[in-house]
C-alpha cells in the first residue's frame, strides 16, 4: 500500500484525456467526447490523484470543492469522485492507498471537515468510514391512480413551459434559498448549473429533450420550477404507454409544489410517472387520495464521511440539547480515533477531545450515517453499531442528532 501511496500524484491538463479515458474504462462505459476532449470547468485537477505505470493511467480519483447543507447550516465538503482502478490492477490495495492518501490530505489541508460521495456499489466505501446519510426515493406510479385529494390547494398561480434561459434565471435563486434548509443538498455555482442543464442528445437513453417548467404567481413572482423528460411508448393494442421522468421539482409554497406535480401528472399519453432522484419523503405522498399508489423504491444516495470529527460535529446544530462523551472508533483516520466531548443545542455546538469516560461508543461510519439527521442512533444501536455506556445516552444523542427536514441530495456527481 505504501508503495502505491507514494506514487500517487495529481493529473495535469495534458494528461486529462488519458486520465479520463482510464476512468471510463474502469466503469465499462464509453466516455462522452465532451468530457474527454477538454478538462470540464467544474473539474479540479489539482485535487485529483492518479497512479501511472509508464504513461498508462491505472487508477484515478478526484475531489470537488462543494458546500453541503447540514442540520442548521452549511459546511465545506470534499465531493469525492472519479474513483477507479484499472481491471488489470484491482484487488491489490490500490483503492485502499488512494483513500488513505486522500483522507490524509483532506485532514492536513483543513478545508473540509466532511467528505461525501455517490457510491457505484454499496460494498466499497464502508471500510473507509463512509456511510449512507441520504436516500433517494426512486418514486413511481401509475398516473391514473396518482390523483390528488379534493382538498389540495393548487393556489392561483400558473405553470409555464419555458426555455432554458428563463428557467435558469428562476431556478438559480430558488434553489439557493431552498437548499440551505435541506440537509444533504449541495450548493450549485454557475459551473454546476451548466453541467446540470447540459442536455447531450447521446445521453438521453431514449427519452425526450429536457422540458422545463416554472410556477408563476398572479403578481409575476416565480415560486417554483420543475424539469422532466417524456419517454413515448404504445402497447401492442394501440394504447398510450408513455412515461414522464421527473428530474427535479422545487417550490417555495405548498400550492406551487402541488401545481407543478399536478401538471406533471396530467400529461397526455403518459401512463407512468418516475422520479428517480426525488426524496423518499417528498410531500407528494400527502397530496394523494390513494397514497399507496405512489411506489417508493428507496436506496442509498449521498454517503458521508467525517474527515475531522470535532469540526464536523461542531459545524451542525442540534434540535435538542446534547452533552455527552462519544468514543469514536476510526481505523482509517487515527486523528479521529478517541473520545470527543460534544455539547450541542439549537443555536450552536462545541466538540473537543477529552479523557473523560464515554457515554456512547460508535464507529465513525455510524456517526457519518447519523450526521445529516436522517438515520436513527437507536436503529444503529439495535444493529450493534452503537454501544450505550451511560443509561439514556442513546435517547439523548438520538433525539439531538435527528432533524425535522429529511436529508436529501438530488445532485449526483
Ligand atoms: C465515488 C466514486 O467514484 S464511486 C466509483 C467507484 N469505482 C467503480 O465502481 C469503478 C469500477 N471498480 C473499480 O475501479 C475498483 O474495483 C474499485 C475502485 C471499486 C476497487 O479498487 P481496488 O484497488 O480493487 O480496491 P482494493 O484492492 O484497495 O480493495 C480494498 C478492499 O475492498 C474490497 N473491495 C474493493 N472493491 C469492492 C467491491 N466492488 N465490492 C466488494 N468489495 C470490494 C477488496 O476486496 C478489499 O478488501 P480487503 O481489504 O478485505 O482485501
Image (cartoon, grey):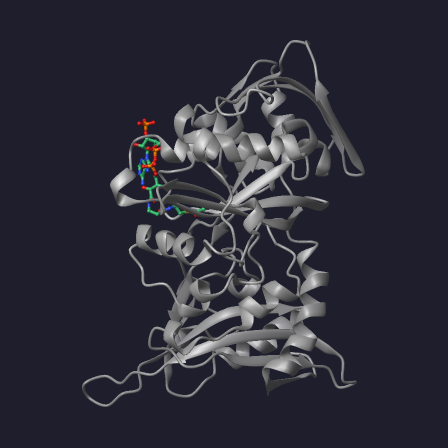
Q: Where is residue 50 shown, x and y percent of the image?
A: 44, 43
Residue beneath the point at 57% across and 40% down:
115
Q: Nearer the viewer, residue 303 or 370?
A: 303
Pick the front one: 305 or 97: 97
Residue 234: percent from the left, percent from the top? 26, 85
Which of 224/162 is in front? Answer: 162
Q: Tell me which image quadrant ligand 1 sits in.
A: top left
The image shows residue 20 at horizontal and vertical percentages of 41, 55
Q: Quadrant of residue 110?
A: top right
Most foreground residue, 305 or 217: 305
On screen, 100 above or below 189? above
Is residue 407 in view?
yes
* Quadrant the N terminus occupies: top left
Which residue in the rendered view is the most extreme toward the front?
A: 54
The residue at the point 29 percent across, 83 percent down is 233
Quarter of image, res 218: bottom right
Query: Which image quadrant for residue 180?
Result: bottom right
Instruction: Residue at the far left: name it.
Output: 236
Residue 1 in sight here: no
Q: Residue at x 53, y 75 (%)?
A: 227
Amino acid at each position: 500500500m505504501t508503495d502505491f501511496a507514494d506514487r500517487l500524484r495529481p493529473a495535469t491538463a495534458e494528461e486529462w484525456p488519458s486520465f479520463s479515458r482510464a476512468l471510463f474504462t474502469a466503469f465499462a462505459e464509453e466516455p462522452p467526447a465532451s468530457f474527454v476532449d477538454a478538462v470540464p470547468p467544474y473539474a479540479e485537477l489539482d485535487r485529483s490523484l492518479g497512479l501511472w505505470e509508464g504513461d498508462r493511467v491505472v487508477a484515478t480519483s478526484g475531489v470537488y470543492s462543494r458546500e453541503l447543507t447540514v442540520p442548521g447550516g452549511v459546511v465545506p465538503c470534499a465531493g469525492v469522485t472519479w474513483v477507479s482502478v484499472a481491471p488489470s490492477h484491482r484487488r491489490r490495495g490500490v483503492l485502499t492507498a488512494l483513500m488513505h492518501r486522500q483522507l490524509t490530505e483532506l485532514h492536513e489541508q483543513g478545508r473540509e471537515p466532511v467528505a461525501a460521495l455517490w457510491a457505484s456499489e454499496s460494498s466499497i466505501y464502508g471500510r473507509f468510514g463512509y456511510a449512507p446519510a441520504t436516500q433517494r426515493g426512486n418514486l413511481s406510479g401509475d398516473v391514473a391512480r396518482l390523483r390528488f385529494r379534493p382538498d389540495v390547494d393548487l393556489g392561483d398561480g400558473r405553470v409555464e413551459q419555458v426555455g432554458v434561459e428563463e428557467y435558469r434565471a428562476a431556478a438559480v435563486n430558488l434553489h439557493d434559498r431552498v437548499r440551505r434548509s435541506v440537509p444533504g443538498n449541495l450548493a450549485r455555482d454557475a459551473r454546476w448549473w451548466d453541467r446540470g442543464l447540459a442536455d447531450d442528445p447521446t445521453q438521453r437513453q431514449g427519452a425526450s429533450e429536457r422540458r422545463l417548467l416554472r410556477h408563476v404567481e398572479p403578481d409575476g413572482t416565480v415560486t417554483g420550477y420543475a424539469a422532466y423528460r417524456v419517454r413515448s411508448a404504445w402497447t401492442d393494442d394501440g394504447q398510450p404507454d408513455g412515461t414522464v421522468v421527473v428530474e427535479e421539482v422545487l417550490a417555495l409554497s405548498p400550492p406551487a409544489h402541488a401545481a407543478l406535480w399536478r401538471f406533471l401528472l396530467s400529461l397526455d399519453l403518459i401512463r407512468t410517472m418516475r422520479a428517480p432522484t426525488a426524496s423518499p419523503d417528498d410531500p407528494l405522498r400527502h397530496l394523494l387520495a390513494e397514497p399507496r399508489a405512489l411506489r417508493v423504491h428507496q436506496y442509498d444516495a449521498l454517503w458521508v464521511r467525517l474527515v475531522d470529527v470535532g469540526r464536523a460535529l461542531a459545524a451542525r446544530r442540534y434540535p435538542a440539547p446534547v452533552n455527552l462523551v462519544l468514543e469514536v472508533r476510526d481505523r482509517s483516520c487515527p486523528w479521529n480515533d478517541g473520545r470527543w466531548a460534544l455539547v450541542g443545542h439549537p443555536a450552536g455546538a462545541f466538540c473537543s477531545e477529552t479523557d473523560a469516560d464515554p457515554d456512547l461508543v460508535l464507529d465513525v461510519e455510524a456517526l457519518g450515517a447519523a450526521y445529516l439527521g436522517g438515520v436513527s442512533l437507536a436503529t444503529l444501536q439495535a444493529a450493534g453499531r452503537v454501544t450505550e455506556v451511560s443509561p439514556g445516552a442513546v435517547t439523548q444523542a438520538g433525539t439531538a442528532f435527528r432533524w425535522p427536514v429529511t436529508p436529501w441530495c438530488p445532485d449526483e456527481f
